[in-house]
Image: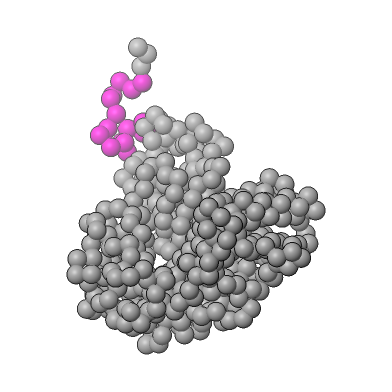
Amino acid sequence: MTDQPDDLLPATRRALLHRLATVQAEGRTPSLVGAVVRDGRTVWTGARSMIDDHAPTPDVQYRIGSITKTFAAVLVLRLRDEGLLDLADPLERHLPGTAAGDATVAQLLSHTAGLAAETPGPWWERTEGTLRPELADLLDEQPLRHPRGRRFHYSNPGYALLGALVERLRGAPWGDVLAREVLDPLGLTRTSLLPRAPHAGGFAVHPWADVMLPEPLTDTGRMAPAGQLWSTAADLARWAAFLADGDPRVLAAETRAEMRRPAAPAEEDWSAGYGLGLQLRRRDGGLLFGHTGSMPGFRAGLWVGEREGVAAVALANSTSGTPSPAALAADLIAIVAEHEPPMPRPWRPLADLDESLLALTGPWYWGPQGFTLRLRAERALELVPLAAPGGPGSRFRPGPDGTWTGLDGYYAGETLRVVRAADGSPVHLDLGSFVLTREPYGPASVVPGGVEPGGWRPA
């Protein structure tokens, strides 16, 4: 059992370690290691093992399974940001000759290409990649299970194809590109395609008896981008910090935010979704983003709590078991949030003020519905319904042409324009053709369809 004290309170560290130990015991896991990240740095690690007085350190490698997909997605989005591809491009444009050529890059990233979940032939996770030497071996002759773009259907071969896309456009093996563009800049020195000592062995635990069976440690070849990577709690803590706080050398902040927006079709009140290479979960009113992972002998979970400002990682060397490392990682975030809720940022006035923007603030009306327009830092605006003054509003980013672009909700991507009188005073707001005025339905001259000449009246 290990515990690395830092700036968490002793009671918090004790609660974290107790939860990890409980999961290791109840899940009958040979070993389990976890880490917590806050404010971009690791503030706690803990471990538990079936061997008395021994537990893995944060630098012991485990197989991380589909957490690998988060790395693959970052490589693809780097290509997009460099202008080498568009997310709307069909795969065929850059990687001809596959059975999924008309699927778009975005559909592959978000698992909406309709592709089969697994490869044809034997179980790829427990067999050598030499059984699937060519891209044509990753899908059968009829790879579609659903119409393109209609629903979320998880596809491991889809991410193998994305890895091949990276290789084609970079002219180098996927693992080499990953090391050069991501692992080395972020200092992830213990993340690799194949295991490097010290690493854990993978085991299956019998469902009805406390006995174990070693699992094969295979090289999956072309399927590597779907789940091949080995990593450590320490390295994945750094990766979680990157997903949360970023590093412009690797990926722009706007692109990281794009990764955690729901890209797959979802219900309005969704509880689970998928972005571009990131799984999304709603928990207790907040958003977790990250990924789960499993390979024979290993399971893993990495979550970032957007509201809590805390991330957690959990790695286990068993094929199955309940609770899962992914559930543990979510629990670790909840424990820190409960014991040490984040301090709110101090209020500060704006660094500068444009009087013409100040004149826009206050109440506006779309027909009879009232809103408040607030001025935020760096000329940003926020539109909040008067019926929910303390609730979240729609945010707008300023553009160089004097307009604003919606960032979220119904108005995401829509343009907000200020229509001014000859003297420069604001008359009304045009928000994607909706007209907002200073008074309910007034002045009549700017309201689409006009206003009844008699105006407001009693019943």
Main SS of the magenta part reads loop
The residue depicted at 47 percent of the width and 54 percent of the height is 280
Query: Is 346 on the left or on the right of 435, as rendered?
Result: right
Residue 349 is covered by the magenta coloring: no
Question: For this rendering, which residue is in front, 431 or 300?
Answer: 300
Instruction: Find residue 63 and report its horizontal and vertical position in percent.
Output: 53, 70
Residue at far top of view? 459
Along the line of sight, the residue nearer the viewer: 207 or 59: 207
Residue 234, position as x, y percentages in the image: 64, 70
Residue at the farthest left position: 141
Picture layout, residue 200 above or below residue 304: below
Which residue is found at the position 42% from the left and 35% from the top? Answer: 365
Provide the residue span drawn in magenta: 441-456
Name the quarter where the N terminus is drawn. Answer: bottom right
Q: Is residue 210 above or below residue 248?
A: above
Q: Quadrant of residue 402?
A: bottom left
Residue sitting at x 28%, y 37%: 448
Q: Position of residue 37 (x, y in %)?
A: 65, 61
How far across and how far down the image is residue 32, in percent?
A: 63, 62
Of 322 and 378, nearer the camera is 322
Q: Nearer the viewer, residue 341 or 5?
A: 5
Residue 75: in sight, yes or no? no
